[in-house]
Image: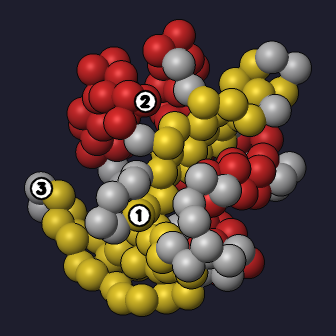
């Protein structure tokens, strides 16, 4: 089941973000930098703000949150995040979250997503969902450089 996120979901959203980041970025982003990012982007105040101002969904299995997705609405519509508990990778939950979020936009909307260029699982997921490559940028956080791919699709 997919539903809108609530403030009560924040502890589970934080837990899933940490689990997913550890699994996905263990060979890509140093642990200290992961912790800093998660502390900034997934603190209670930031998540409350995102729940209030964006399309923020959680996925449940047997009443337990196992994933979430966050979509921005505005001049540039963007899929900000899809994160899943590693225990449910490849079960179609990411697809359900994506389809749910996309259903809130009118046909013809351009939807963008940014993904680490080394995150092959995510790139394959977005490619399978008709996102196409737009550009790659070099980004720097502290002394670490990353390549980030921007992908997009036009919603039908």
Q: Quadrant of residue 148?
A: bottom left
Can you tell which mark lies on residue 142? Answer: 3
Q: Earlier in the sequence, mark 3 or mark 1?
A: 1
Is disc 3 in contact with disc 1, using a CB cutoff of under 8 Å?
no
Q: Position of residue 119 (x, y in %)?
A: 53, 68
Q: In the picture, which quadrant includes the N terminus?
A: top right
Give me the C-alpha separation between circle 3 and circle 1. 28 Å
Q: Nearer the viewer, residue 136 or 131?
A: 131
Can you tell which mark lies on residue 42? Answer: none
Can you tell which mark lies on residue 77? Answer: 1
Q: Earlier in the sequence, mark 1 or mark 2?
A: 2
> What residue is rendered at 41% in x and 78% in y?
149
Give me the C-alpha separation between circle 2 and circle 3. 28 Å
**Does dot 1 land on a helix, a strand or a loop?**
strand
Local crowd size for mark 1, using a 10 Å CA cut-off: few (<14), some (14–19), many (≥20): some
Q: Quadrant of residue 98?
A: bottom right
Is disc 1 in contact with disc 2, using a CB cutoff of under 8 Å?
no
């Amino acid at each position: 089941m997919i539903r809108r996120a609530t403030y009560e979901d924040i502890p589970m959203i934080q837990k899933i973000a940490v689990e997913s980041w550890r699994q996905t970025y263990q060979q890509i982003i140093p642990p200290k930098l992961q912790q800093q990012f998660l502390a900034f982007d997934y603190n209670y105040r930031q998540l409350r703000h995102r729940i209030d101002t964006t399309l923020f969904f959680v996925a449940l299995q047997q009443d337990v949150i196992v994933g979430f997705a966050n979509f921005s609405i505005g001049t540039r519509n963007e899929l900000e995040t899809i994160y899943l508990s590693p225990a449910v990778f490849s079960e179609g939950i990411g697809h359900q979250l994506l389809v749910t979020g996309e259903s809130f936009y009118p046909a013809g909307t351009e939807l963008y997503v940014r993904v680490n260029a080394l995150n092959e699982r995510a790139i394959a997921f977005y490619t399978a969902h008709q996102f196409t490559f737009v550009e790659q940028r070099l980004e720097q956080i502290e002394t670490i450089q990353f390549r980030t791919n921007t992908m997009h699709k036009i919603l039908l």
